[in-house]
Amino acid sequence: MRVDIVTIFPEFFQVLDVSLLGKARQDGIIDVRVHDLRDATTDRHRTVDDTPYGGGAGMVMKPEPWGQTIDAILDDAAGQPAVPAEGSGSGDARPLVVFPSPAGTVFTQATARRYALEPHIVFGCGRYEGIDQRVFDDTAERARVELVSLGDYVLNGGEVAVTAMIEAFGRLVPGVVGNPESLVEESHEDGLLEYPSYTKPALWRGREVPDVLLSGHHAKIAAWRHEQQIERTRRVRPELLPPELR
Ligand SMILES: N#Cc1c(-c2ccc3ccn(Cc4ccc(CN5CCCCC5)cc4)c3c2)n[nH]c1N
């Protein structure tokens, strides 16, 4: 899987050199390439923004550097088709270009599962008040374009969102996580929040571990854990439950 990231803060993504994703990159499972948008500027000040047409506060990112950078990435990728992960992908052979945006659809575990099947994703990290709309419209001529939001709060740019998205789908790419079993029983994977976890010691600061977890009775443990998931989801995120369980 190939991932290209366009940003004015390339150093931001040094975080992708560590932990699981760092190993996935070293193992060649995920090929991450970071591109500095300013490398596509032509003026002495390497300008990437300008005032908004129609007025308004802040600055908007100019289309030219974006168009040039995205074209170069897509042209390069066209010559080196990336290998899709196992499993059925979108069926649309065009590359996927994702722009984090406060105006995007919310990124969920379902989005992460879908992205993990893509052979190639380009992420465009905006800053300032956003990117000239024509960049999205022009890119959509040759790629699938998605505007995606992390959630209903305001960030200063797309870099944090892209880091979170790459971690979320990266761990689902076959070969990245050592034990794929650990991906099955986790929050949102089955639509429920996860059950509480415990480990040694059996007694800590006067607090014990639920007896059922010490029973060795796997069916009872599974039933207890599922009930805990439903109880926690009902308390914290009732909207995730089917109406009959709320
Ligand atoms: N993913 C994600 C995000 C982002 C996100 C993602 C990408 C960029 C690029 C730039 N910014 C900053 C910014 C902040 C506020 C506004 C709102 N408008 C401003 C102009 C007048 C109208 C309203 C726009 C752009 C970004 C923020 N925020 N929250 C998420 N979950």
Image (cartoon, rainbow, N blue to C red):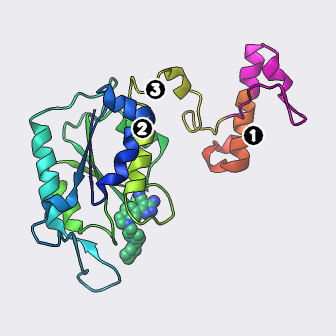
Q: Nearer the viewer, mark 3 or mark 1?
A: 3
Q: Disc 1 designates what residue?
A: 231
| Badge 2 vs badge 3, beta-carbon distance below 8 Å | no
208 is within the stretch colored magenta: yes
Quadrant where the C terminus sits is: top right
Q: Is residue 141 visible?
A: no
Query: Which amino acid does the dot numbered 1 rest on?
Result: Glu
Position of 107 with respect to 59 (left or right) is right
In this rendered view, identify the residue nearer to me: 139 or 10.
10
Q: Nearer the viewer, mark 2 or mark 1?
A: 2
Residue 42 numbered mark, or none: none
Residue 19 position (above or below residue 243):
above
Position of 221 with respect to 143 (left or right) is right
146 is within the stretch colored magenta: no
CA distance separating discs 2 and 1: 36 Å
Q: Secondary structure at mark 2?
A: loop
User: Which range of residues does the magenta coloring cover?
Assistant: 195-224
Residue in the picture at 21% in, 59% down: 37
Query: Which amino acid does the dot numbered 2 rest on?
Result: Val
Q: Disc 2 designates what residue?
A: 18
Residue 26 position (above or below residue 17):
above
Find residue 236 and report its horizontal and vertical position in percent.
69, 49
In this rendered view, identify the residue nearer to me: 233 or 164.
164
Answer few, some or many: residues within 10 Å of disc 2's Cα (few below 14, many 20 plus, some between 14 and 19): few
Mark 3, ligand 1, within 8 Å: the answer is no
Q: Disc 3 designates what residue?
A: 177
Find residue 80 and report its horizontal and vertical position in percent.
13, 33
Answer few, some or many: residues within 10 Å of disc 3's Cα (few below 14, many 20 plus, some between 14 and 19): some
Position of 243 with respect to 4 (left or right) is right
